[in-house]
Image: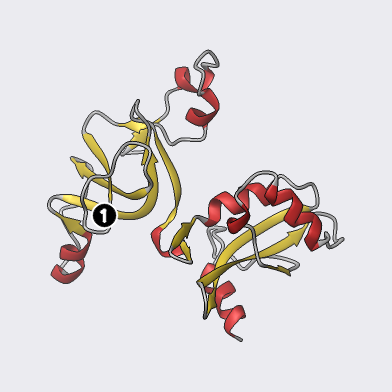
Amino acid sequence: MAITVLSREEVADRSHPRWRERLASVGRAQSVVEVMIGDEAGQALPIGEVGEIMVRGTPVMPGYWENPEATEKTLVGGWLMTGDMGYLDEDGYLTMRDRSKDVIISGGTNIYPREVEEALLTHPMVHEVSVVGRRNDEWGEDVVAFVVPASGTIPDAAELDAHCLAQIARFKRPKAYFWLSELPKNNYGKVLKTELRRKLEG
């Protein structure tokens, strides 16, 4: 909330041709904040290209307490490297994609789990889903999905594949589905993807 805001007027406005995309964004930078999308070296990326969300301004911390190594890694040239991936549109609206550590790299291509999860969640038999990368000797990683069925009835994998293919590129669809009664979460309700990755290693 200290970085971006989507005003009540913007939420209510349906006249803009991209109002749905704006609703999916986290809004525009607050007046005391600058937001930039950067590459791995912290260099600015073009409008619309996904990269790491970088922030500087009054609300940004000056550094970690008595931890200069962490400060040097996180604050680069006055910019806070948030660890979140996203992009800016031409009007300055910021849309988040994923945490940088959750990005799946398959065959040299970045795949954002959130996009795959959002596609699967529109299937009526999917209650919850979490997508992670699985080690693959040929491609580096491939996409797998942990799914909590909506009614206790496990949906057919081929049906989920077809559902994904109608919404996202073929190479992004999960190569395997794992069925769970519930997803592992912390006390704040956040899915623990590290535990899901551990299940793949077991």
Neighbourhood count class around disc 1 (C-alpha, 10 Å): few under 14, some 14–19, many 20 upward: many
Q: Is residue 123 left or right of residue 183?
A: right
Q: Quadrant of residue 189?
A: bottom right
- Is residue 191 placed above or below 54 in the rendered structure? below
| x and y, in percent, of residue 132 in the image | 56, 66
Q: Is residue 58 left or right of residue 12?
A: left
Name the residue nearer the viewer: 190 or 15. Answer: 15
Q: Which residue is mark 1?
A: 81
| x and y, in percent, of residue 11 in the image | 50, 23
Q: Secondary structure at mark 1?
A: strand
Name the residue nearer the viewer: 24 or 192. Answer: 24
Residue farthest right in this picture: 153
Report the residue at 49% width, 16% height from top. 16
Q: Amino acid at mark 1?
A: Met
- Is residue 195 placed above or below 158 in the rendered structure? below
Report the residue at 87% width, 60% height from top. 153
| x and y, in percent, of residue 77 in the image | 12, 52
- Is residue 66 placed above or below 38 in the rendered structure? below
| x and y, in percent, of residue 167 in the image | 65, 44
Give the mark count: 1
For the C terminus, the image quarter is: bottom right
The scheme the figure's colours follow is: secondary structure
Report the residue at 18% width, 57% height from top. 75
For the N terminus, the image quarter is: top left
Residue farthest bottom in this picture: 202
Q: Is residue 39 left or right of residue 97?
A: left
Report the residue at 74% width, 49% height from top. 163
